Image (tube, helix red, strand yellow):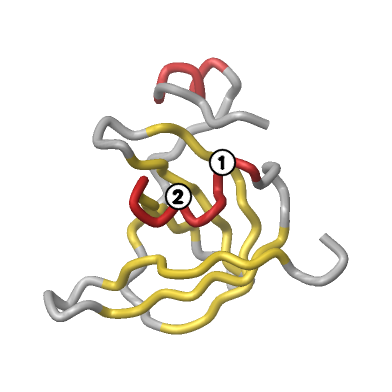
């Protein structure tokens, strides 16, 4: 499934991303990829639901190969690694498909 190109496209499909927040935690998390869309700055925005029910939005950039997110189908279960940078922000650094996905 290709990424949506706009918020309007998501809303037309009944997907509302207002409840997704940026992740402030560092660590490894199991999550479902709910949807994804292209950003305006050569990035892809991915919307995840963590195992604990948290809804998180994260960005991946062209210089990292978008962490493979464009090729991952919506609904896939993933292992996500977030690392805190020197600026204090927790960034998505690694995306892995879970066994059997």
Which percent across, then down, holds residue 94?
Answer: 49, 69
Quarter holding residue 99: bottom right
Cα–Cα span, label 2 and label 1: 7 Å
Residue count near mark 2 (Cα–Cα under 10 Å), binned few <14, some 14–19, many ≥20: some
Tally of numbered tags: 2
Which percent across, then down, holds residue 90?
Answer: 29, 72
Residues marked 2 and 1 touching at CB (< 8 Å): yes
Query: Residue 70 — which label?
Result: 1
Say which element carries label 2. helix
Say which element carries label 1. helix
Placement of the N terminus among the 4 image quadrants: top right
Determine whether 100 is above or below 33 in the image: below
Residue at left 49%, top 18%?
9
Residue at left 42%, top 47%?
19
Residue at left 66%, top 64%?
78
Which percent across, then down, holds residue 63?
Answer: 34, 52
Query: Residue 25 — which label?
Result: none
Residue at left 52%, top 81%?
28
The residue wearing badge 2 is 66
Placement of the C terminus among the 4 image quadrants: bottom right
């Amino acid at each position: 499934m290709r990424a949506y190109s706009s918020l309007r496209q998501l809303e037309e499909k009944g997907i509302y991303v207002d409840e997704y927040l940026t992740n402030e935690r560092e660590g490894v998390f199991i999550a479902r990829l709910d949807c994804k869309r292209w950003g305006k700055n050569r990035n892809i925005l991915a919307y995840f639901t963590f195992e604990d029910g948290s809804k998180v939005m994260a960005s991946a950039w062209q210089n990292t190969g978008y962490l493979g997110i464009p090729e991952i189908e919506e609904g896939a279960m993933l292992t996500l690694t977030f690392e805190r940078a020197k600026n204090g922000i927790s960034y998505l650094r690694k995306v892995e498909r879970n066994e059997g996905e």
